[in-house]
Amino acid sequence: MTELATPSAPWLALAGGLGFFLLGLELLTDGLRLAAGPNLQRLLSRATDTRWRGLGTGILITALVQSSSLVTFATIGFVNAGLLTLHQSLWVIFGANIGTTVTGWLVTLVGFEWALESWALPLVAVGAFSHLTGKNTRRGALGLALAGFGLLITAIDLLKSGLGVPLRT
């Protein structure tokens, strides 16, 4: 992803990454708030109603997306949208941190790693198209959340490049 547009000055990547991060978090939160019908709220509530379920949910989702940062940011978005309580979110974030370790072991043992960064721009495109063609519908709201999620992935990649953190190949 960083081949796309890594500025020559690291501070530009940091500034752009921070802007994408804030915009992505706002879009994700607004989309989730608009789409949060009773079904989504019930699903999140069931997945995090006990400490162990919250922990397991964090581990599972982190193992699937291979990024505890994204799980943490999405969890913050859920709290901001009023879909999770602070107590529920803490256990999901604890699980995300454990999930990072599990993911590392799985990658080491199995050799499989999924580059989520390669999906960032398609997520933004699909999300924006869904939002623009589905104004005032649940599909449009989910599109907004999806575009925000793609921007968060892009932001993390830009921030890593601006900070000089080695990227996966």
Image (spheres, rainbow, N blue to C red):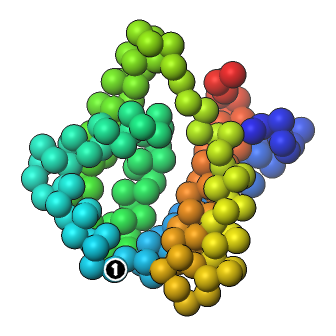
Relative to 163, does residue 89 appear above or below in the rendering? below
Residue at the image position 89 percent from the left and 38 percent from the top: 8
Q: Quadrant of residue 52?
A: top left
What residue appears at the point 66 percent right and 27 percent down from the top-left corner?
167
* Residue 38 x/y as whole percent: 27, 79
- The percent position of residue 95, horizontal first and vertical second, equals 27, 39
Is 137 placed left or right of 37 in the picture? right
Say what amino acid the circle numbered 1 marks.
Answer: Gly
* Closer to the camera in the image, 74 or 39: 39
The quadrant of the image that shows the N terminus is top right
List x then y, in percent, for residue 76: 39, 60
Q: Residue furthest top?
A: 109
Relative to residue 47, is residue 125 drawn left or right?
A: right
Q: Which residue is mark 1?
A: 37
**Which residue corresponds to the image point at 40% horizontal and 18% vertical from the top-left?**
106
Quadrant where the C terminus sits is top right
Whole-percent x, y for residue 26 in the image: 55, 70
Q: Is residue 120 left or right of residue 138?
A: right
Please state the total of marks drawn on the protein image: 1
Q: Identify which residue, 114 or 78, lies in the foreground.
A: 114
Judge whether residue 159 can be spotted in this image. no
Is residue 80 toward the left or the right of residue 119 in the image?
A: left
What residue is rendered at 25% in x and 64% in y? 43
| Residue 102 visible, this angle | yes
Image: 150 above or below 67: below
Q: Secondary structure at mark 1?
A: loop
**Residue most toward the bottom?**
136
Q: Is residue 92 above or below residue 98?
A: below
- Depth check: 158 or 27 in front? 27
Mark 1 neighbour class, 10 Å CA radius: few under 14, some 14 to 19, many 20 or more: few
